Every structure is written in C-alpha cells, then in structure tokens.
Amino acid sequence: MTACNGCEFRPELYYDAEYQIWARVEPGGSVSVGMTDISQTRAGRILHVRVRRPGSARPQGKPVATVETGKWAGPVPNPFACVIEAANEAVLDDPERINRDPYGEWIARVRPAMPLEKALAGLVTGPAAEEGFCARCRADHIECRRL
C-alpha cells in the first residue's frame, strides 16, 4: 500500500481511468467492485447504497450500484459488461463502512460477460495505475479523509 495526498492506493487492484472504482479478481473468476479512496472522499459520508438485483446484466459504463450521501447521489459505474452476482450485505446495512475502509469493503460482485483477460484489459493496475492515481490526486488537489 502507498499513499498520495493521504489517499490510499493498492497496486494489486485494477482501476478505471478516472480512479473512481477498483476491481479485484476473486477465486472462480468473479470480480469484486468498490469505490476508491478518492471516490469515497469526494462523495462524503455515505448514507445509502443500493446494488442492482443479482442476475441483472449490465453493459459497460452502466451502474452496478447507486451511492447516496447528504450532498450527492450517483452511480458506481461498471468497468465492463457483466452480470451482477451479489451485493455486500455488510455495506448495505452500514454504508459508512466504505468511508472507513474503501478497499476492504466491496460493493458488488460481478461476473464478466467476456473472458476475464478481455474484461480487465480496459483497466489499469500496478505501477502505471499508481502513477495515474497520484497524478489525479495532485491535479485535482484531492486530500483523502476517512470517517
């Protein structure tokens, strides 16, 4: 783990181009999706999370979940076409868990609608992701905070 402007970064995860969401491959080929430290900080205190119904097919870019705060409601975008397998019940019951531990708490578990390697090809990981993540923190003057 490293940090940029106080924002935690995990090099083993996959990230979208805006560093809004992270993805982690699970045993069996499903993928857990969650919010990055940048996203949870910019959102503020998360009050409600709603995940689309398991079994729902979602095209790339469409939300797998919706997050609501006191000042904002918005999507958790899907990084690739998929079918939703599960919602993290712990997060549904206590949405602030995302604010406290954004990388320890996934929001939705999905199954890519294409081979896993192809699904992950549109995401960035490792040193390249770290460089982009830190550049985003600096460019947007983002300093992460936790509840």
Image (cartoon, helix red, strand yellow):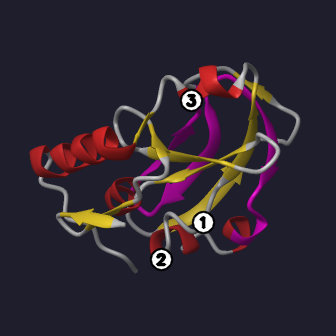
Nearer-N-terminus badge (1/3): 1
* Element type where label 3 sits in the image: helix
Q: Relative to 8, say whether 109 is above or below.
A: above
Q: Are marks 1 and 3 in contact (CB under 8 Å)?
A: no
Q: Are marks 2 and 3 in contact (CB under 8 Å)?
A: no
Residue at the disc numbered 2: 100
Which residue is more in the foreground, 59 or 117? 117
Judge the density around disc 2: few (<14), some (14-19), many (≥20) Cα neighbours within 10 Å.
some
Which residue is more in the foreground, 145 or 119? 119
Q: Amino acid at mark 2?
A: Arg
Q: Amino acid at mark 1?
A: Glu
Which residue is more in the foreground, 53 or 10? 10
Residue at the disc numbered 1: 105
Is 134 left or right of 102, judged from the image as shown?
Answer: left
Farthest right residue in view: 55
Is 131 left or right of 57, judged from the image as shown?
Answer: left
Nearer-N-terminus badge (2/3): 2
Looking at the magenta stretch, what is its main secondary structure?
Answer: strand
List x then y, in percent, for residue 63: 61, 34
Give the magenta range.
62-90
List x then y, in percent, for residue 83: 79, 31
Quarter holding the N terminus? bottom left
List x then y, in percent, for residue 18: 34, 36
Q: CA distance from mark 1 to mark 3?
A: 20 Å
Nearer-N-terminus badge (1/2): 2
Is 129 left or right of 79, judged from the image as shown?
Answer: left
Residue at the disc numbered 3: 120
